[in-house]
Image (cartoon, grey):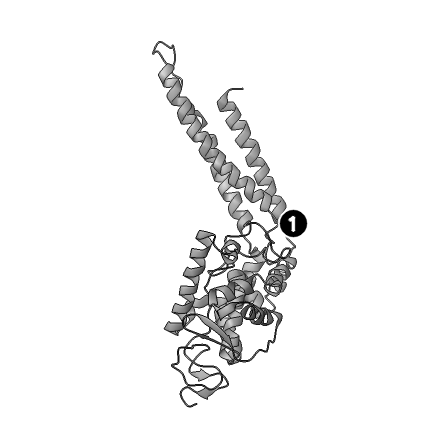
């Protein structure tokens, strides 16, 4: 066969395999009845909306608002009451204990990789609301390989076309189009198929999961949040750190996000390597960081990024006066409900 025929056959076969893989991955997801597509906890809502990072954000928000944690400048997390009401909150406390200095970016990265946070994603995958990162990992790599191959074949086609033009003495009886033109339809089709399939393989939230998230958002918009501490976690779970009203606190988490991004780019720390995505390499403790790098539904989802929050407004934890550089919680209350500045 000629070079052009090989290109058509090779890309055609690879595209068919990718399409088959897409069908297998979709059919391998557990079916969910419409009435069962509901997040059961605020942690599941957060995971659907923004992955592991959003779960930690929600935990920080609730624990800050009720005075168990405080976050002060420059991005330092301190424990005021070491009590936890859920395994995710226990993971946050453990992360603080394991982080010298309590740097927010490091605490957040450590908590995201914890088993308690990762288990939230596993439970959602078991119920068909998300797809586990292990599903389709090989297919994603094949799709990426096909995309790279189409670029390489385009370059090779250009080189062959230039070589053919140099060898043409102008005495041929007919006109043969350049090789790059003859293979262009196959290259375009192969690139489109690979790009679309890779998008499907990388999408973590299923249709049922998207319905569940919309349902939770609708319930919240109707005033479904109850209790001050619960409201802070739920607001952050659904909307992320962009909803934080306290400018100082929001800036602290933006700084933490930039710090983590620089660490990721430089590959200079374990937090940075974990932030690079699903296929970043070693898993540490087994599969404990498989969900790190999820980009579905919101920002701050990669392990190591710093988009967490502590509610909205300004308050202080256990009755201390506001304005001391620590900001956690929502509204104007301080911890247990005493007025700011009233000591």
Q: Residue furthest left?
A: 170
Q: Residue reaching furthest bottom?
A: 342
| Residue 285 vs residue 206, the one in the foreground | 285
Q: Quadrant of the C terminus?
A: bottom left
Where is residue 127? Give x, y as percent: 64, 59
Q: From what the image shows, is residue 188 above or below residue 268?
A: above
Q: State the SS at label 1.
A: loop
Quick check: 114 above or below 174? below
From the top left corner, tell me how far across and down residue 144 is, in percent: 51, 41
Q: Which quadrant of the rendered structure holds the N terminus?
A: top right
Query: Seen from this angle, which residue lies furthest front?
Result: 100
**Considering depth in this image, is 248 or 25 the residue closer to the camera?**
248
**Label 1 sits on residue:** 28
Percent from the top left, x then y, of residue 198?
52, 45
Dot 1 crowding, Cα within 10 Å, few <14, some 14–19, many 20+? few
Q: Quadrant of residue 178?
A: top left
Q: Residue at x 47, y 86 (%)?
A: 319
Asked whether residue 214 appears in the rendered view, the answer is no
Is residue 50 shown above or below 185?
A: below
How many badges with numbers are in the image?
1
The residue under the point 59% across, 66% down is 39
Q: Toward which corner of the image does residue 55 lie, by quadrant?
A: bottom right
Can you see residue 72?
yes
In x, y percent, where is residue 50? 51, 61
**Residue drawn 55% across the image and 80% down it:** 81
């Amino acid at each position: 066969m000629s070079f052009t025929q090989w290109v058509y056959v090779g890309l055609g076969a690879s595209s068919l395999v990718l399409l088959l893989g897409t069908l297998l991955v979709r059919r391998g997801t557990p079916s969910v009845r419409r009435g069962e597509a509901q997040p059961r906890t605020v942690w599941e809502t957060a995971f659907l909306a923004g992955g592991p990072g959003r779960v930690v954000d929600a935990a920080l928000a609730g624990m800050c608002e009720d005075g168990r944690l405080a976050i002060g400048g420059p991005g330092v997390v301190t424990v005021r009451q070491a009590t936890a009401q859920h395994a995710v909150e226990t993971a946050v406390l453990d992360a603080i204990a394991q982080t010298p200095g309590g740097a927010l970016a490091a605490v957040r990265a450590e908590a995201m990789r914890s088993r308690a946070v990762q288990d939230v994603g596993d439970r959602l995958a078991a119920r068909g609301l998300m797809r586990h990162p292990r599903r389709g990992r090989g297919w994603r790599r094949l799709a990426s390989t096909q995309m790279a191959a189409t670029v390489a074949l385009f370059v090779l086609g250009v080189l062959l076309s230039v070589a053919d033009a140099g060898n043409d003495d102008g005495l041929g009886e007919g006109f043969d189009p350049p090789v790059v033109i003859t293979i262009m339809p196959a290259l375009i089709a192969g690139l489109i198929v690979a790009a679309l399939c890779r998008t499907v393989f990388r999408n973590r939230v299923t249709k049922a999961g998207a319905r569940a998230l919309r349902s939770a958002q609708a319930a919240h918009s109707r005033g479904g949040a109850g209790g001050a501490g619960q409201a802070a976690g739920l607001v952050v779970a659904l909307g992320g750190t962009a909803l934080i009203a306290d400018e100082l606190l929001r800036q602290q988490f933006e700084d933490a996000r930039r710090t983590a991004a620089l660490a990721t780019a430089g590959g200079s720390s374990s937090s940075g390597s974990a932030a690079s995505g699903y296929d970043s390499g070693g898993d540490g403790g087994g599969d404990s960081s498989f969900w790190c790098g999820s980009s579905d539904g919101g920002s701050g989802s990669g392990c190591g990024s710093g988009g967490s929050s502590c509610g909205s407004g300004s308050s202080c934890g256990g009755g201390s006066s506001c304005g001391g550089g620590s900001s956690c919680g929502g509204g104007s209350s301080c911890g247990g409900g005493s007025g700011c500045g009233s000591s």
